[in-house]
Image (spheres, rainbow, N blue to C red):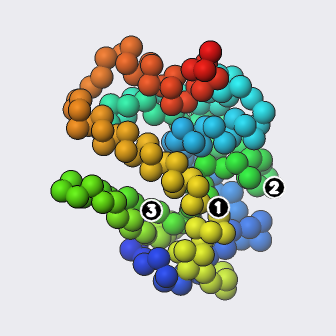
Amino acid sequence: RDLLIPIAADTVFRFECSPKVACFNQCCRDLVQALTPYDVLRIRQGLGLPSGRFLEQFTRRHTGPGSGLPVVTLKPADEKTRVCPFVSPSGCRIYPHRPASCRSYPLVRSLGRSRATGIARESFYILREPHCRGFEAARERTVRGWIEEQDLAGYNAENDRMLDLIHLKNRLHPGPLPADTIAALALALYDLDAFRT
């Protein structure tokens, strides 16, 4: 059973992920991988693909049940195993451009915003999945150290902008959006090349 354990920013935890860990690449299977607009931008730039081609070849678009906004997920390489299209036996083929959720694993970041003051507050958790052997490693680090090591600060800043958009949409237009509005938002958020033209 998965465990979500609260952790403070300066708390030390043990974790390592490499080909030496017995479960290497297992977290890249049986997943539904949501991508933020910044994830799409970074991956498609890393692959050298126009945004429209990347979206068509590697993603699916849905409507978020809570937000009513467009959500993009990776198309699995295999529908049965739901394996990531970018995983190989030697690891991630887009590692320098991998999505924020892959970068942060096993760290989970939650951002809450006070309705009264608008001030945002971060919370952190460690996700312990039964298959993961990375926690048996000797290497120690803090949450802050992990964020720095995984180059997450820029991802967090960009992804927080999306949270601001979700809050604004829910405040100004609670409930479903018309299909043409969802399509326009998908264009502006994810298909930047088409949006520019």
Tell me the SS state at disc 2.
loop
Q: Is residue 34 shown to the viewer in this render?
A: yes
Nearest to the observer: residue 134 or residue 122: 122
Number of the front mark, 1 or 3: 1
Picture residue at 78% right of the left edge, 33% below the top: 48
Instruction: Provide the residue designation for mark 1.
Output: 151
Nearest to the observer: residue 117 or residue 50: 117
Picture residue at 38% right of the left edge, 31% below the top: 69
Number of the front mark, 2 or 1: 1
Few, some or many residues within 10 Å of mark 1 (<14, 14–19, 20+)? some
Instruction: Provide the residue designation for mark 2.
Output: 90
Tell me the SS state at disc 3.
strand
Place of residue 57 in the rendered image (x, y in percent of width and height, measured from the top left): 67, 25
Q: Residue furthest right?
A: 90
Place of residue 118 in the rendered image (x, y in percent of width and height, measured from the top left): 27, 55
Residue 109 — which label? Answer: 3
Picture residue at 74% right of the left edge, 52% below the top: 96
Image quadrant in which the N terminus is located: bottom left
